[in-house]
Image: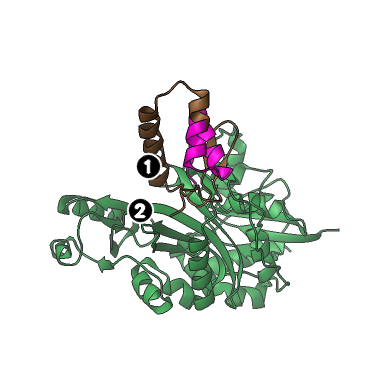
Amino acid sequence: MKKQLTIAVTGLNNIDSPGPGIPVIRALRDSEEFEVRVIGLSYETLEPGIYMHEMVDHVYQIPFPKSGTEVIYGRMAYINSLENIDFLFPNFDAELYNFIKLADRMEKELGIKTCLPTMNQFESRHKVNLEEFGEKYGLTVPKSKMIFSPAEIPSLAADFTYPMVVKGQFYDAHIAYNKAQVEAHFNKIAAKWGLPIVIQQFVYGTEVNIVALGDGNGNTVGMVPMRKQYITDKGKAWAGVSIDDQGLLDEAEKLIKESKWKGGMELEYIKTSEDKYYLLEINPRFPAWVYLAVGCGQNLPEAAVKIGLGKKVKQYTEYEVGKMFIRYSWDMIVDMKEFEEISTTGELGPRKKKAS
Amino acid sequence: MIALKKNIAVSESGFVFNPTTGDSFSLNPVGTEILRLMKDGKGERDIKNTIRAWYDIDEETLEKDYYDFLKMLGQFKLLDA
C-alpha cells in the first residue's frame, strides 16, 4: 500500500509563461511510492491550477512574498492546522527567500518538511552574483554587471560589446543591439521587477537547459538535458526534446558536486559552435518543463520529496533521449461560485476541513 | 573515410534525429539511401555505385551533388569530426 502524504505546492499559474506547480503535481501524482493529497497555494485568484480539481485537492491563497516571513509563517501555520502538511514544494524564485528562511522553523514547529537549497546557495547563484559563482566553481559564465541607473548605460561600452542581454533580477531578459535598446529594456524591466538590472554579454550559440536534483551532499540524484524546439514570445519553451549531451551532463554534475546543491534546479546554458558551455542562469527550483524528466524515466519531484522526508533516494543514471514535450492551452469552464469562493474566503476545495 | 556520427538515428521514412543537439531533419529518398549506406559502413565508391545503379545520372553531377550533400551533413554536425 502506498504511503499517504499531504503536499503543499505553489506555482499554480499554468499560463503562457507557466509556473512549475502543475507539472510538479503531475509528477507527484505519478509516484509509485506515495499517494498525495495536494494542497495548492496561490497568490492570484485566476491562477488556472486553482480550478484544476483533478490536480489540486484544496487551494489556499497565501500572502505575496513582500508581506514578509512572519505573515507567511502565520498563514502556513493556519493552513497546516487544517491540513497537516507533510511537505512544502515552493516553485517560484521570488518566494524562495522566505521559505528557505522559514524552512527550519516550519519543520520544527509545524512538521512541514522541504527540500530546498541553503540561503548561501540561493544567494550565491543569483543573477547578480553568477560571475563570482562561476569563478568559484570553475564554470564559464558570460561577463556580467549590475547597474542601478540609466546613467550607467553609456559606460557599458567600455566592458561589453553589442549585442548584450538586459535582465531583471528575478525575471525577464531582452537582447539589446544598441544603447537606445538597453535604455528601453532597462526602464521596462526596472518598472516591473525593480533594481538592479543585470547586463550580460551576449553569447552566440544554441540554448540548452538541464533539470537536475542535488541531495545536498554533492550527489546528483538525477538530471535530464533538453533543447527548446519552439519558443514563445516570452522566451519560454513551448516544445522541447530530451538530448544526449555528455558535455552538458558533466557541467551540471560538476556544479552540483562543487556547490553541494540541495533541491531541484534548472541550469540554462549556451553551447557555442566550438562546443563550449556558457552558464547563463541557475534557477533554484524545478522548471515548468520538469514533467519531461518524468516522461524520460526520472521522477525528480518525487525524489525531492523523499530527500526532504529523509528517505533513501536511488540515483537515476539513465533517461530516455528523444522524448518531446509539447504544451497546449485548454479553456476550462469554471462556475462563478468557485471564483467567488476563492476571492472572498481565500480557499477553494471540495474537501474542506474545520479548524481544530 | 567520412562517417556518420554513431548516435545519429535514421528512420526508414528518412527522418533523422541528432540526439546530441536535438535537431531533426527530413530527407528525400536519395538522401535516406545515402545515410543508410553510410550507417552500414559503406565507403564513397560503394555509395556512388549504388546511386548510379538506381538513377540515371552522369558521374559529374553525382560527384557534385554527393559532395554538396556531405558538406550539408557536416554543417549540421552529423558527421564524425
Camera-near label (2 vs 1) is 1
Q: Which residue is label 2 attached to?
A: A205
What crowding class fits label 1: few (fewer than 14 Cα within 10 Å), some (14-19), or many (20 or more)?
few
Q: Residues within 10 Å of mark 2 (few under 14, many from 20)?
A: some
Q: Nearer the viewer, residue A251 or B46?
A: B46
Comparing A331 with A211, the one in front is A211
Mark 1 belongs to which subunit? B
Query: Is-magenta flag for residue B31?
Result: yes
Kind of element beneath mark 2:
loop
Question: Does residue A252 appear in the picture of this structure?
Answer: yes
Q: Are marks 2 and 1 in contact (CB under 8 Å)?
A: no
Q: Which residue is mark 1?
A: B71
* Chain letter corresponding to the colour brown: B
Chain A: colour as depicted: green
**Picture coordinates of residue A321, whole percent (x, y):** 59, 50
Q: Secondary structure at mark 1?
A: helix
Whether residue A70 is visible here, answered yes or no, is no
Callout 2: residue from which chain? A
- B18 relative to A79 in the view: left or right: left
Percent position of residue A244, x then y: 55, 55
In this rendering, is residue A201 above or below B33? below
Q: Position of residue A269 (x, y in %)?
A: 42, 59
Going by the numbered disc 1, the residue's amino acid type is: Lys
Up/down of A248 relative to B16, above or below: below
Residue in the image at 41% along x and 35% along y: B66
On the rendered structure, is A86 left or right of A188? right
Residue A91 is marked as none
Identify which amino acid the numbered label 2 is placed on.
Gly
Image position, residue A73 (x, y; %): 56, 69
Most distant residue in the right direction: A1
Residue extent of the magenta highlight: B22-49
Marks 2/1: CA–CA distance: 20 Å
